[in-house]
Amino acid sequence: MATFFSPSCLIIGDEGPSQDLNVGVVVAEILDGRFVPWEKSLEWESYIDLYCLGLMKRGHKCIKYVPSLAVSATQTYHHKFGHLVKRIPVYNRWLLAPRSLLRIRAFSLGYTTIFRQALGPAFTVNMMREAKKDGLHVLHYSSYYTSFFIPAFLAAWRLPMVTQYTGGMLPTNTLRRLFWKLSILPSLKASRAVLLGDYYSEIRSLISDLGVSRAKQEFFNAPVIDSNVFHEFDKRAAQENLGFNPKKKNILCVTYIPPKSRRSELLAKNPYLMLDIIERAVRTGGDEIELHVAGWGVGLDEFRGYVRDDGMTNRVHIFGHVEHTQLPVYYSASDLLFVPYRLETLNEGSATVEAFACGRPVAAFKRNSTDQAEQLGGFLVETDPQLGARTLLDRLRKPGYLEGKGREGLALAGQFTLDFAGKRLEEIYAKAVEG
């Protein structure tokens, strides 16, 4: 049977006394079936699942809600981390979302629909029925650029709510910008706190475009790592295990690979641009460089062709999808992680903080030309391939530079641990409950 899930909500009920919080909590996250099929989601380590793990360590019971087109009654499962996962139907007899408008469309790794906005009210009614049975007290809604901003707004009539803003800057297209503002604003206005990392553009957008005061914004880093999994292994042993040449400068890229057609999108992952920069660096004398790609996606075959057309086949090793718990070995075998994404600072993305936890520096593209190249834990390169290649080569060849940046990253990794996230969330929830 075809399955679909889009957002998920996590309930955390108190099992015993805690230093900071004696309430239950609900956390909601958008999960898109195009990327994570339902049958694999109970093994998946999403940010929300890791938040559950961090909060359970502090004595809380966790439940995650997942909207589904494939069920007519709520079904309950157990995630491998120990928290419950509930699949909640998105249709009901009171608020009918017409199936004729919500045709399921198949993707290579799951399913999605059109007009997902129509699912919001019906799903919320079903979700709140479960929330009442489960005795939750706070809704933590993790928002992305999707249609599921409606449930958070409706649920806030009954529950204190915090919204984790991870949607980035608003689109530049006028109509799309208006649509997203109308979708986002109800949730943000209804929230008692808006959670956000140290992202200058997003902070500015929240204040100037969406009218969310700085006082309402609470600092919280979205990426989370389990230090028991992500830590440094012996570099030489890791290189021997994976076949990395210790005499080379080994650059690792852990990424989703989109089709080439998305290269022009400003904030899309762009491994093609990364390859252009590395190819220029090799051509201008960087004979010591080798690239290792642990990546998968609908553009994988196109990327292989791009590598071949660039004449980089002997220098680029593509591993495809790598089991998440095996990634620390890849980080440890590398000299540098390259995140093919435009960043203002090196504080975004799972791969970034995972590399930091393994003591490896990180490089990414500059989002704006005025962004500083030097960053804690690594550096940013220009998006012009020639300039980017020059910056990359300079850092690779500077004695002791990468090792020093790796130590900086390792120090930063402490802000992204399960323990740090669990404690910070408790502090935010306590303020939300107090109103």
Image (tube, rainbow, N blue to C red):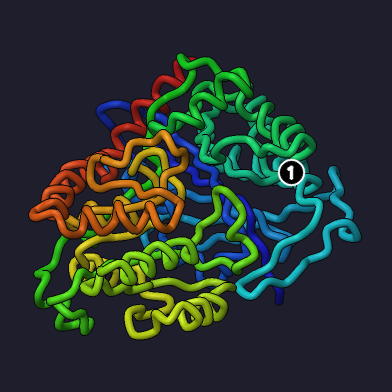
- Say few, some or many: other residues with alpha carbon within 10 Å of mark 1 (under 14 / 14 to 19 / 20 or more): many
Who's the residue at 71% across and 45% down the image? 147
Placement of 109 over or under 152, stated as above or below:
below
Who's the residue at 36% across and 59% down the image? 81
Q: Position of residue 391 (x, y in %)?
A: 30, 52
Placement of 338 over or under 52, stated as above or below:
below
- In-front residue for pair 39/286: 286
Placement of 261 over or under 319, stated as above or below:
above
Q: Where is residue 348 in the image (x, y as percent from the top left)?
A: 39, 45
Q: Which amino acid does label 1 sit on?
A: Gly
- In-front residue for pair 431/222: 222
Image position of 66 (left or right of 367): right
Quarter of the image holding residue 31? Answer: bottom right
- In-front residue for pair 135/354: 354
Who's the residue at 22% across and 54% down the image? 394
In the current view of this chain or complex, which residue is farthest to the front?
284
Q: Which residue is disc 1 drawn over? A: 120
